[in-house]
Image: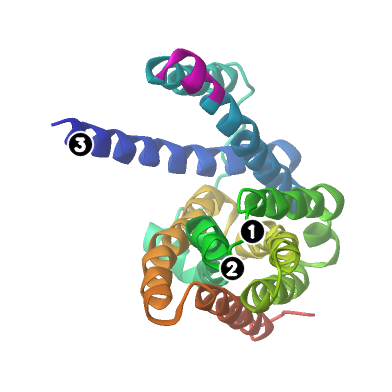
Amino acid sequence: MSLATIILGRLVAGFGESQFVTGCVSWSIASVGPQRAGMSMSWTGIAMFAALAIGAPIGMALYQTYGLEVSMVACIVAPIIAAAIALGASSYTTPTGTRLPFYRVIGQIWKEGLGLMLSGVGLSGLTAFASLYFAERGWAHAGLVMTAFGTGFIFMRAVFGHLPDRIGGYRVAFWSLAIEAIGQALLWAAPIEMVALAGALVTGLGCALVFPALGVEALKRVLPANRGSAMGAFVAFLDIAYGVAGPLAGVIAGQFGYAAVYILGAAAAILGALLVLGRRGAKV
């Protein structure tokens, strides 16, 4: 009964989080206008990763000091505060026009979504297998992998988050995916721990702008009245990547070793770059 309750709670939380991300992205784009959609999505992502970076140690400190109940109360209070902020914010009028069925929206943006999905394979391999990979090699600082990734990710979004709006999403996505592939290759071939951490950093640099870059192009392919649906479908492709890539990487790791997980990530990033390169109107 306890396990069933936990599973139900995670399902409900997952539904809420997915709708929250879609709503926040749509809300932020409406706030600044579609001409700055790339910057908007960049900063939304920075906020999310900052929450992960800050929330994890706070949650652990609460758990170690006061127990599980207090840490879970904090997890309940945080979204309530966010809901209060949302209720007090200004509403934006939904653009008028023809609203397409969801499947037709997917049909218009699926290539951009597929590129995003392929970029998510590398991050999935990092989160699921970096600790095991480092332990297998006898390296002691697996905890720094996500720190290195997050450093590259946040730096790239903070400094270069304007690029998708300025020079075009396809160009930014192509070079970002190429950089991600290099980072994954460094992880695969790393002879020492520092090279592996450098690979995680480079992977973060590469992953950072794929979402806003391809998101900008996805928005261009739908009518204004369908932007919310387009963002919902677009985000779903990344969720699919995380859901599918983990088990697939596990099978590959079981057959060929943990290093092979990062060959998968590099190959997926290269496929994503080729997909972007073949997209009509792409300039790299």
Question: Around disc 1, counting alpha carbons within 10 Å, would you say few (fewer than 14), some (14 to 19), or many (20 or more)?
Answer: many
Residue 254 x/y as whole percent: 37, 75
Magenta range = 61-67
The number of numbered discs placed on residues in the rendered structure image is 3
Task: Give the residue drawn at x 59%, y 19%.
Answer: 85
Which amino acid does the dot numbered 3 rest on? Answer: Leu
Assign a secondary structure to mark 2: helix
Q: Which residue is mark 2?
A: 119
Does residue 154 appear in this view?
A: yes
Residue 89 location, quadrant: top right
In the image, is residue 64 part of the stretch drawn in magenta? yes
| Foreground tag (2 vs 1) | 2
Assign a secondary structure to mark 1: helix
CA distance separating discs 2 and 1: 9 Å
CA distance separating discs 3 and 1: 34 Å
Which amino acid does the dot numbered 2 rest on? Answer: Ser
Look at the picture and state if 207 lies above or below 273: above
Task: Give the residue drawn at x 59%, y 34%.
Answer: 93
Which amino acid does the dot numbered 1 rest on? Answer: Phe
Tell me which numbered mark, 2 or 3, is placed earlier along the sequence: 3
Residue 63 x/y as whole percent: 47, 22
108 relative position to 34: left or right: left
Q: Which residue is mark 1?
A: 211
Q: Which residue is mark 3?
A: 3
Quadrant of the image containing the N terminus = top left
Q: Which residue lies most toward the front here?
A: 138
| Foreground tag (3 vs 1) | 3
| Disc number placed over residue 173 in the picture, else none | none
Residue 116 x/y as whole percent: 57, 66
Asked if the residues shown at circle 2 and circle 1 are in contact, with their CB atoms under 8 angstroms apart, the answer is yes
